[in-house]
Image (spheres, rainbow, N blue to C red):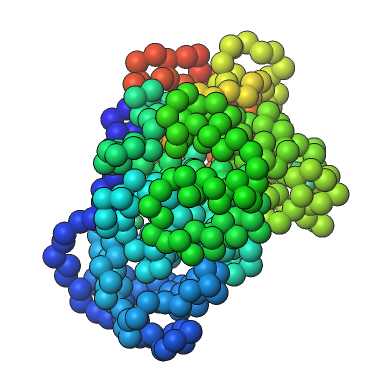
């Protein structure tokens, strides 16, 4: 729970304008030809962030001309801009923008702040009510541009953008954190932590309702009347593009009243295939089946990698090992196989089978549970051999992304230490846990023992439910 709040706070701070005294040690410069002129871009960055600076510069040079084409408006009258990479915060001050902790592969904040060049901020009282629109557009725009072919984001960049704006809820989002109304007529819009997350969701809903072409028209219509001073104007445009009860569609999110068509619970991934139930509804995949077409590849993985999740013939030509929390067929004999046919526990932690495969110098570990369940589960793996190599790895899946919360190495316990190189793993909440790791990274070169524990507790760590474990002997030899 505490961690959850910390997470919200961190996100909130990220999105708030921070006044900071930057300590830049280096700069990187480049230019880009825009509609009206050549724009010079300077990236200022602290020591050790050269890679980040390069990533920012490369993307800015590709992104700015693409926005010009997408929104049909030239970049404003600046000859040069500076992008400052800071430890936290993000804002657009005109001649310079500040962005928080940019990491290569995570462009959400950069794009958001660059977009503000076209849409500015809500400056006058009349415009302030439309904060939901401006902020949501700023965050969602790169995705709309990607889907319309104006920029090319990598699958992991797409995931990162969704993740940065907390697209996904999970069952432990406490009630008081669930979104209140964004639209507060005449009142200052709320600056609660979910504000950005929900403005993004509203854009997602509008985009999904309209489809990419009409969403693009929606945007062009908006920019014609920018800055938008009333919600009615927005709804008018929406109705022109698609006649429907937009009040009902956006009730609870934008308009006062109870959530009607789309509920916060739709932003949960109930079958752990990386598509939220709302996305499955729009894509017509099953929100209860991780692999709708039964070809062995999870719905979300197929979408992200350009395959059709509703066509079993649309899949990789050769069997590829995908860590997606779905049991894909492998033309390999497992080096370890254990089955527990009885459902002897009543929770998601009841293990049905455990398999290990040799994949080159790595091991793919798969564990199947009896049930698909939305609960917090700890996955603990103990690796040990006779040479006193003794590793404990533990991860906790209450957060959208799995991460190691602790490692115990040869008896030493280091809480919160992230193990590098990180084993790749996938599970979330559903019935398959998959992990791939190199035994050599853990000092294991010969046969070793592996114990896998699955156990759960509630978000407060007070109520525990039945756990299960499997102990296996792995006949391993480094080749
Ligand atoms: Ca799903
Ligand atoms: Ca599904
Ligand atoms: Ca599939
Ligand atoms: Ca398919
Ligand atoms: Zn903003």
470 or 418: nearer the viewer: 418
Q: Quadrant of residue 199?
A: top left
Name the residue located 38 percent from the left edge and 23 percent from the top edge. Answer: 175
Name the residue located 26 percent from the left edge and 41 percent from the top edge. Answer: 188
Residue 431 point in image, percent of width and height = 63, 28
- Which quadrant holds the C terminus? bottom right
Residue farthest to the right, as pictured: 313
Decide: is 418 above or below 255: below
Residue 427 in view (yes/no): no
88 or 316: nearer the viewer: 88
- Horizontal side of residue 154 vs 74, given as left or right: right
Name the residue located 45 percent from the left edge and 25 percent from the top edge. Answer: 257
How many dots with numbers? 0
Q: Quadrant of residue 40?
A: bottom left
Residue 88 point in image, percent of width and height = 26, 57
- Horizontal side of residue 380 vs 89, given as left or right: right
- Horizontal side of residue 134 vs 35, given as left or right: left
Residue 125 point in image, percent of width and height = 26, 50
Name the residue located 54 percent from the left edge and 63 percent from the top edge. Answer: 220
Residue farthest to the left, as pictured: 21
- Horizontal side of residue 76 vs 219, given as left or right: left
Residue 185 point in image, percent of width and height = 34, 37
Residue 220 in view (yes/no): yes
Decide: is 181 above or below 155: above
- Which quadrant holds the N terminus? top left
């Amino acid at each position: 729970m505490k961690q959850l709040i910390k997470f919200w706070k961190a996100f909130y701070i990220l999105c708030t304008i921070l006044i900071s005294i930057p300590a830049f040690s280096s700069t990187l410069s480049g230019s880009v030809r825009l509609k009206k002129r050549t724009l010079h871009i300077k990236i200022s960055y602290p020591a050790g962030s050269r890679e980040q600076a390069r990533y920012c510069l490369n993307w800015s040079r590709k992104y700015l001309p693409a926005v010009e084409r997408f929104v049909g408006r030239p970049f404003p009258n600046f000859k040069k801009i500076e992008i400052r990479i800071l430890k936290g915060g993000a804002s657009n001050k005109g001649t310079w923008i500040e962005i928080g902790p940019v990491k290569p592969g995570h462009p959400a904040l950069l794009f958001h702040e660059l977009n503000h060049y076209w849409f500015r901020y809500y400056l006058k009282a009349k415009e302030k009510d439309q904060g939901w629109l401006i902020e949501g557009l700023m965050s969602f725009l790169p995705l709309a541009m990607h889907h319309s072919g104006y920029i090319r984001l990598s699958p992991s960049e797409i995931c990162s953008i969704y993740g940065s704006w907390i697209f996904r809820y999970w069952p432990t989002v406490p009630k008081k954190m669930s979104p209140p109304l964004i639209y507060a007529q005449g009142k200052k819009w709320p600056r609660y932590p979910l504000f950005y997350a929900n403005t993004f969701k509203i854009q997602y809903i509008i985009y999904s309702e309209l489809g990419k072409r009409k969403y693009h028209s929606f945007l062009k219509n908006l920019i014609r009347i920018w800055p938008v001073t009333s919600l009615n104007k927005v709804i008018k445009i929406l109705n022109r593009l698609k006649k429907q009860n937009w009040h009902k569609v956006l009730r609870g999110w934008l308009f006062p009243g109870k959530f009607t068509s789309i509920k916060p619970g739709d932003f949960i991934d109930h079958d752990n295939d990386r598509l939220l139930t709302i996305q499955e509804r729009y894509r017509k995949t099953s929100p209860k089946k991780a692999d709708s077409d039964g070809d062995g590849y999870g719905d979300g993985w197929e979408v992200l990698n350009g395959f059709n999740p509703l066509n079993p013939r649309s899949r990789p030509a050769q069997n590829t090992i995908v860590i997606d929390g779905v049991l894909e067929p492998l033309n390999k004999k497992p080096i370890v196989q254990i089955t527990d046919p009885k459902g002897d526990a009543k929770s998601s932690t009841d293990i049905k089978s455990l398999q290990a495969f040799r994949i080159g110098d790595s091991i793919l570990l798969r564990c199947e549970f009896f049930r698909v369940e939305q609960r917090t589960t700890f996955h603990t793996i103990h690796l040990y051999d006779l040479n006193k190599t003794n590793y404990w790895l533990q991860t906790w899946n209450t957060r959208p992304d799995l991460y190691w919360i602790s490692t115990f190495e040869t008896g030493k316990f280091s809480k919160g230490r992230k193990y590098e190189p990180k084993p790749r793993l996938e599970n979330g909440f559903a019935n398959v846990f998959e992990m791939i790791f190199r035994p050599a990274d853990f000092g294991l070169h010969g046969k070793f023992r592996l114990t896998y524990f699955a156990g759960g507790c509630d978000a407060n760590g007070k109520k525990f439910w039945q756990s299960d474990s499997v102990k296996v002997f792995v006949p391993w030899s480094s080749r």
